Image (tube, rainbow, N blue to C red):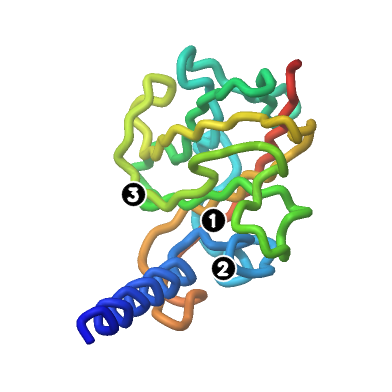
Amino acid sequence: MKTRVKVIQYIAILMGMVSSAAAFPPAVGILGKAQSCLACHVDNGLWLDGADLIIDIVEKGTGRSLRQPDGTFKLSVKRGEPATVMTIIGYRNSVNEPVPYRNAWLYVAPETIGDSALSKFLPGWEVNLPMACRIVGDKSDLYPNANLTALPMTICPGDAARNGRVTLQVMLTRGESVKGKPKEGMLGSYFEKTLTLEVSE
C-alpha cells in the first residue's frame, strides 16, 4: 500500500513538472509546433533593434564576439571538443523610457520545429543550455551600464554533426502575462539572430 502511494505521489510530481514546463517560457519549438514566441506573445514593446539593443554571442574564455559584418554570428568548433559561449542580451539604460527586466531566448534549428525530439538544436550537436528565461542583473565588461542577462552555453559537435544554422529567438519583456491570456499584461519586443555553426575537423 505504501509503495502504491509513493508511486502515485511520484506520478503527481512528474505531471506537475510537465505542466510547469509547458507553461514556462521559452517553450516555443520544444513542446509545440509554434514557429516563434509570437505564437503566444505580442511584439508590442518599446525596445527597437538599434544602438541601444544588445544581443551578442561571445567566446567565454576570450570575450571575443562572434558577430560577423552582416550582423549574423559564426562559431567554428573542433569535432568532439566542447566550446563555451556567452549569450548576452539586454538594453542600455534610458532616462526617458522603461527598460526590460526579463529576457527569454531560445536557440532552435527551424527545420526541427514540430518533430518529437526534445532538443531543437542542430542534429548531432550536444548542447547544455539552448534556452533560458532570466531576470536582468548580470554584468559584462563589454557592456557596462546596461541591463543585461548573460549565461554560458556549452556546445560540442559529435560524430554526426554537420555545418548548419540555428536561429536565436529573443524576447525582451516587462510586466507579467495574464494567466491563460499570454497576449495581455506584458510588454515584449521580439528579435531574431542567426548563428552559423561549423565543424572543424
Under mark 3, the amino acid is Ile
Residue 97 in view: no
For image coordinates 38% across by 52% down, the residue present is 102
Q: Nearer the viewer, mark 1 or mark 3?
A: 3
Tell me residue 52's x, y (percent): 50, 37
For image coordinates 62% across by 65% down, the residue present is 38
For image coordinates 42% across by 52% down, the residue present is 133
Q: Earlier in the sequence, mark 1 or mark 3?
A: 3
Which class describes the residues within 10 Å of circle 1: few (<14), some (14-19), or many (20+)? many
Between 73 and 166, the one nearer to me in the picture: 166
Disc 1 to disc 2, C-alpha distance:
8 Å
For image coordinates 70% across by 43% down, the residue present is 122
Label 2: element kind: loop
Residue 91 in view: yes
Contact, mark 2 vs mark 3 (Cβ under 8 Å): no
Between 139 and 110, the one nearer to me in the picture: 110
